[in-house]
Amino acid sequence: MRHLLRSPDARTVFALAAAVGLAACENAPAPPAAGQEPGWSLAVGGGRLDLDLDYGGQSLNLPLLVAEQAGGVTRYRAAEPGHAAVVSAARRVCRDTMSGVPHPFTVEVQIDGDRLAGCGGQPVSLLAGSWEVEQLDGGGLLAGSRITLEVSAEDRRVSGLASCNRFTAGFELGGEGLTVAGPASTRMACAPEVMEQEERFLHLLAGARAFDLDSGGKLILSGPAGRLTARRAPAP
């Protein structure tokens, strides 16, 4: 890698930035991030920036100097004599280039003259919250019916109204996608067409293997069984 901090005043810049900026860095949110080809990973905390490069072949632990926020982008600057890094984290959906799993932050790392691109933050944060299902395999819901999803990031559970009955299920979200444990539901009886819609929804939910957000922020759960689409529920 090329080295940027080799000018005669580099140590002066380092000292001044550390003196004026470190307090601001301590409270700056910094999502963990990673990228592919070449593989890299990033963590910020405790006034340091930890960067693993080339699939772990090289590791840098740099003092964090300043964190700046502007226009929805947070920039972290870290340096020591011989190395300089600027990390930009934008709250914009980013999809892992290998798995396609979406993340809440798009991250760019500039390190010693090289540029790395990747994703940051926890994918489950995009899933968490309240959703209203709009479509099952491209078709709308029965008039007057509702299907809801309440996704908890803390205990990895999804629950809600399946059309007639309440349901709950656990889920796992990893680097390769999504898996949903078989949903359990109450046993109320409704009109046959409502029960049929409920069965179809539960089948699609249990078969979900991936999630994504479309350009309008709608949630898409998909798998071999089909797909369902949901919109964010309005705040109460």
Image: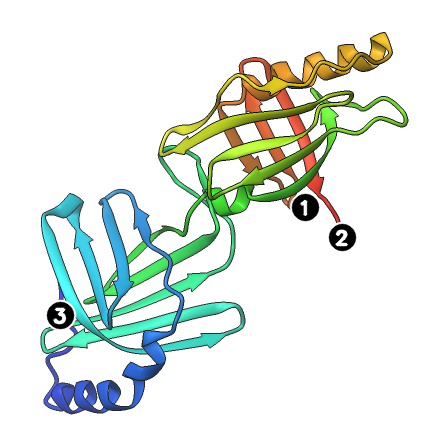
Q: In this view, does 70 lie to the left or right of 198?
A: left
Residue 3 marker: 3
Real-space Cα separation, disc 2 to disc 1, in angstroms? 21 Å
- Residue at figure coordinates x 29%, y 74% from the top left: 77
Q: Is residue 14 above or below residue 135?
A: below
Q: Is residue 35 above or below residue 209?
A: below
Real-space Cα separation, disc 1 to disc 3, in angstroms? 42 Å
The front one of 190 and 147 is: 190
Snapshot quadrant of residue 14: bottom left
Q: Which residue does the numbered mark 1 point to in the structure image?
A: 216
Snapshot quadrant of residue 146: top right
**Residue at the farthest top position:** 192
Front label number (1 vs 3): 1
Q: Is residue 173 above or below residue 63?
A: above
**Position of residue 197 measured from the top left corner of the image (x, y, whole percent):** 76, 15
**Residue at the farthest right position:** 143
- Residue at figure coordinates x 14%, y 78% from the top left: 5
